[in-house]
Amino acid sequence: MQGWVTLALLLSLGVECSLGQNGVGELPVPRGLTLNPDLPAQTLSLTWQSDSSLFDLEIFHTELMNVVLNETVAVKTDPVTGLHSWTWHSPLPLECTSHSAHIRARNQQSVSQWSPLQTIPGSDIPEKSESNMFPQDKVVPVGSNMTFCCIVKEKEDFKEIMYGRQEMSATRLSRRTYAITATNQPVSGNTGTNVICCSQRLTLTGAVVFVGYPPGDEGLVCETRDLASAECSWKKGRDTGLRMRRSRTKYTLNGRDCLEANERKRWWCSSKAWEQSWTLVARNPLGTVQLTDSAQLTDRVHLLAPVNVTAVEVKAWSATLQWSWSVAAYKKLEMVCQLQLFAHELNSTRNYSGPGLSSVVLESLWPDVDYTVTLYCGSKHGFWKWGDKSAPYRIHTKMDRPDALDVWMWMDSSNTGRVFWKPLSVRKSHGALVGYEVSQSSAEEDGWTPVSLPPGNFSYPIILNNGSDITVAVAARNPAGLSQPSTVTTPAYRADSQLSMSELLSTNGSFVLSWQPNANASSGYAVEWVPTGCSGLCPVDWKKVPESDSSFTLNSDSLVAGVRYTVSVYALSTGAPTLLQRWQGYSQEMTPSQSVRELLPNQSGSDVLLSWKATAMENQRGFIRGYTIYLANAAHLELIANISDPEVQSYRVKGLSLSSYKFVVKAYTSAGEDAGATVAIKMEMDTADMLFVGILVPLGIMFCCLILISICCYKKREWVKKAFYPEIPGPKVPGDWSSPQGPLDVKPSPHSLVHIVESPEWDFTKEGLFPVPEEEEESENDNIEVDADSDEPALLRYYNQVVGDGSHGNQVSDSSGSSNTSVDSTQTEITYAGIQSPTSSQGACGGGGYRPQMQSVIGPAEPQIEFEADFQDDGLHAGYKPQCSWQLDSPEAENFSGSLGSPTSVTSSQFLIPESSEEKPQPSNTWFHNFLSGKS
Amino acid sequence: MAGRGTNGRHGSRGHAGRTAALARLLHKECIQLLELYRNSESLPSSPVDGGYLVSIPPLVPQLSDAEKISILHAALKECLRLLEDVITQEDAEFSDEDSEYKRKWKTVRDRLGHLLASTEQLLVEGQKFEAKVKEELDGQAVSGSFRLKMWIVRVLQDLVHWTGQTSDTLRSLPAEVEKAPKTMSRRTRRGAEKIRK
C-alpha cells in the first residue's frame, strides 16, 4: 500500500514538471524592456520586443517590492517600430519612490520567463537627501481624488501630513516616503490648498494643489459702437476658483488673444473690424469653453451717448433741444431717440426719429417748470438696444399768464358775503403769483372798482349797500401778466331756517348728491359746502359741475369727520346763482365731544325731575338721536331710561326713597354716547313729614317719659316724701312750746355764721400774707389745679350738676343765713336735707367782690387763663359757679385733696369723692344714688 | 568707547527713544503679520527648516552699541529688500486682490523703511557693515508655490527676529551712548569725534 502511494506522487510531480518545461520552452522571454516615465502626467511607458501578443506585467515599488500592478495585457507590435508599447498611469507621482517592472510573454496557459527588472529611480534615493513632496502645483477639478507623497530628508523623523487644516492618514511607501490620498477635494482658496509634511520639530516640505472648475463663461454677444469695429461681451459664469496667475482662464476671440479679459479681468473683447461670426475660447488648466455669435453689423448697433446737449430756444410751452454725436458715421444712420423729461409730477417720455437725429422741438411743456432732460438713441432699422444715456440737461421754461380762477361767492346774510377763489396749482399759475385783483360792479354804479390783494389771500368781503346784486371779477397776476377775470354774481341769501333741509347721509364718508336738472343752469351747477352755523371767515368750499350732470359725489377727503356741513346746490347762469337744494349732514358721525349742559335735578315728593339742554352744535359731532339716563351706583351705571326723541330734554325718575342719588345723562349719536353729565341729589322729606318727625314724635316721647316718671313717683311716694320733705323734728326746749306756737324760724347758728365769713377772709389774706417761693407756689398750684378741677372740669361739673344744688345750698345757707341745714363747722357732719335753688348762690360767687380764683394767680399760665376765662364768663352771667364756692368753702383749701375722705372731712356727699374720683365721679352712697336705685 | 561721541545739543535721547519705540512697534506688527499669514495659509506654527535668511557677524559683547546698531541696520536693510521681493513675487504668482493681509504687508514695509531711516541717524559715520542673504528669491531657488510660501514665512521670521533684536538693542542703549542725529550741521558732523577701535 505504501509503495502505491509513493508511486502516485512521483507520477503527478513528473507530469507537472514536464508541463512547465514545455511552456518555458515554447515562449521566448520579451527583450529590451525599457521604462519611460512622464513625471507630470504620472505615466510610465513600457516598450519591449517580442513575438507574442499577450504579456504579463508586474510593477513594484522597488524598495519594499510592493506589487502595484499585476496585469495581463494584449499588446500588438507597432508596425513602424516593431516594438510593443504599453503605458501605465500611476496614481502616485513617480518621483515618490523607485518603480521597477518586468514582463513575460503568455500564450494561454504557457508563459515565458520574466524579463529582467527595469527600475526608474525615485526621489527618495540616498543621493537625494533633502525633503520633498509630490506632486507640486497640480491643478485638479473639484471632487477629484489625489495622492501626495512626502519624502523625508535623511536623518529626520516623520510626524504627519496635513491637507489644509486636516491631518491625513499616511502610508509608508519606502524608507523615507509616506503618502496620503485626498478624496473628493473641495475648491481651493485664493492661493491653493497646502499639503504640508512635518517632522516632530520642523515643517519639512509641502505642496500646493489648486482645486477648481473649468471655465463657465456663457452668452457671447458682439455689437458695434462706431458702425465699424466690434465689441464682444459675455457673462463670466461660475467662478473657477483658480486665482493663481498661471491657472486663470485665458480668452481668445477668433483666435486672437483677448487682452481686455486676460489682463484687465473684464468680460469683453474688442475687434477693429466687424466679422460675420465670432468665436470666443475660454481655457484654463481644467477645461475649455467655446462660445459663438454671428450677426450683421446693422443689427448690432449700440449707439454711444449724445454729447453737447443744449436747449437753443426755450419758451413757456416749448423748447428746442440740440446735441451732437462723437461718431461721424451716426449722421447718416436712421435712428430713433427717446427723451425723458423729469419734473415735479410732470415726468414724461417722448420718442423722435430721423437720420442722424441731432435736434428736436419739445412741445407741450408747462411754463415756469424745471425740466431735466435725458436723451438716448438707437438704430431704427434692426433696432438692437438703446444707446448710452446723455448727461442730464436742465431746462427751465418761461412764465405765462395764469389760468382763470375758480371763483365763488358765499352770502352769510342778506347784505354781506364773501367772494372766494381757489389757489392756482403750479400747472395753472404758470409762474409764481404776485397777487390778485378783485373788481366789483353793481347795477347802480358804472365801471369796476379794482382792489389788489397779496398772493396769500383767497377771499374778499362783499357788502351789498342797497340790496342790489353785485358782480365780482377776480384775476390772478404773475410776472407774465394778469389772468382772464372770473366773474360771479351775488346769490340771493337764504337762511337755513327758511328752508326745509333734509338730512344728508354719508356713504363711506362721502356725500352722494343728486338733484333735479334745472333749465336755468346754462352754465352748470355749483355744489357748495360749509360747516353748519359757521360765521365770519368760514372754510367755504365748492365745486362746479357741468350742466349735463345732476349729481355729484362729495369725497370724504374734503370733509372733516364730526363736522356738520350745509351742502347747497346752485344753478349757474349768466346772472346770480339760484339755490336749488340744501342738505345738512355729517361725513362721519362721532360721539359728542361734550356732555349735555345745565343738567338739573328737581325733587318733587319721591320723584326727581331731571332736565338738561343739548350741547352746542359744534360739540355734537353727529345728529343727536336721543338721550340715555343712568343711575350711578358704586361701580356701574344702571340704565333707567332711553329717550329716543332728541327734542325731549327732561325725565322724571319716580318712586325714590330718602337717600342720595347720582344720575348720569348721556346724549348719543349714531356713533355712540358721550361721556355723560352727572348730577347728584339727596332726597329729603317734604314739609308734612318734617312736621311729623320733628315735632310730634319728640312731644310724644316727652309725654311718655312724664307718665313714666309720674308712675314711678307715685309708687315711690313714701320715699320721695322722706327724701324731699322729711319731717322736721320739733325743737326740744324746756318749757312748754306747744302752744301757742308761732312759725318756726330756724336761723343758722352763730358759730356757723362766723365760720362761713372767716373762710373767704382767709383766702384773701393768704395771697397777700404768704408770698411763697416759686417752688412752693408751683406745688400749691399743683394742688390747686387738682382741687380746682382744672384737669377734669367736666367731671366735677357733671358731679355738681347732679348734686350741686344740695352742696351749694350749704354754702348759700351759710352766707344768706336762711337755710334748713345743720352745720357742724368744727367737725363731723353736715346734713343736707334739701335742694337749694341755684339762684341763691349768686351772692357767694357772683358780682365783683369775691374772686376765689385769684389765689391761683401764681399758678401755671394755662390753667390760670382757663380760670380767668371761666371766671369772666361766670362773672358775666353771674350764674351758678360751683367751683368757686366749693373751693372757698373749705377751711383747708391749701391741701384740700388731702382732706377728702379723711376722718375730719365733712361727710357731705359732695366731698365724699375718693382720690380716684376722676375715674369714678359718682359717689356710691349719696341720696341721689339711692334715689335712682329706688332705695328709701 | 565707540559711539560715544555725542553732543547734547539736539537731545538725541529723544530720537533714540523714538527709534526704539518704532522698532518695538514694528516688531509687534511683524509678529502679527506672520501670525496672519500662517492663519490664512493654514500653516503650522513650527519653524520652517532652513534657519534665518539674513546673516550678520555675531553680536559679541566686545562690539560697541553703535557697532551693534550698524550691524542690525544692515540686517534690516536686507530684510526690506527681501520683503519687497516677496511682495512682488506674491503679486505675480497669486491673486493681487486686496486683503487685510496685503494691507498689513504694505504697512510693515513702510514702517521698516522709517525704522531704517531712523536708525541711520544713530550710526557712526564711516562704519560700514554688511549683512548676507543665504538664499535668494529667484526662479531657481524657489520653485513651486509651496516653496514661495515657505520663503514668505522665512522672510517674516527674519523680520520678526531682526526687528526684535533691533528693538532690544535700542532699548538697552544707555543715554550717554546715543549719538546725535545725522541731521546735525556738516561742520558739527565733521567735528564729531570719530571713534573706531
Image (cartoon, coloured by chain):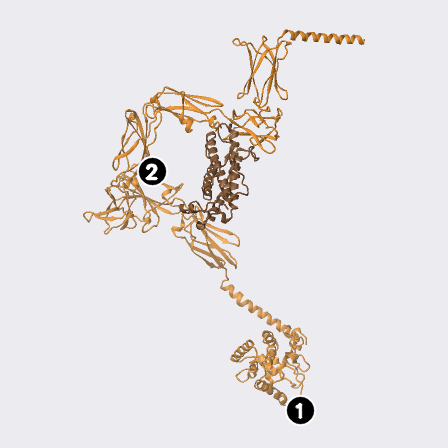
Chain colours: A orange, B brown
Badge 2 density bin: few <14, some 14–19, many ≥20, Cα 10 Å: few
Label located before the other in sequence (2 or 1) = 2
In the rendered view, tell whether residue A250 sits above or below residue B110.
above
Badge 1 density bin: few <14, some 14–19, many ≥20, Cα 10 Å: few
Task: Choose top left, top right, bottom left or bottom right for residue A430.
Answer: top left
**Closer to the camera in the image, A303 or A90:** A90
The spot of residue A128 in percent (x, y) is: 57, 25
**Quadrant that contains the C terminus of chain A:** bottom right
Say which residue label 1 marks.
A737
Which chain letter goes with mark 1?
A
Residue A781 visible: yes
**Closer to the camera in the image, A682 or A100:** A100
In the rendered view, tell whether residue A48 sits above or below residue A889.
above
Task: Choose top left, top right, bottom left or bottom right for residue A423.
Answer: top left
Q: What is the residue that sits farthest to the left in this orientation?
A: A446
The amino acid sitting under disc 1 is Trp
Callout 1: helix, strand or loop?
loop
In the rendered view, tell whether residue A651 sits above or below residue A215.
below
Task: Choose top left, top right, bottom left or bottom right for residue A890.
Answer: bottom right
Say which residue label 2 marks.
A345
The amino acid sitting under disc 2 is Glu
Residue A747 visible: no
**Quadrant that contains the N terminus of chain A:** top right
Q: Which residue is drawn at the image coordinates 40% and 53% (left, top)? A: A615
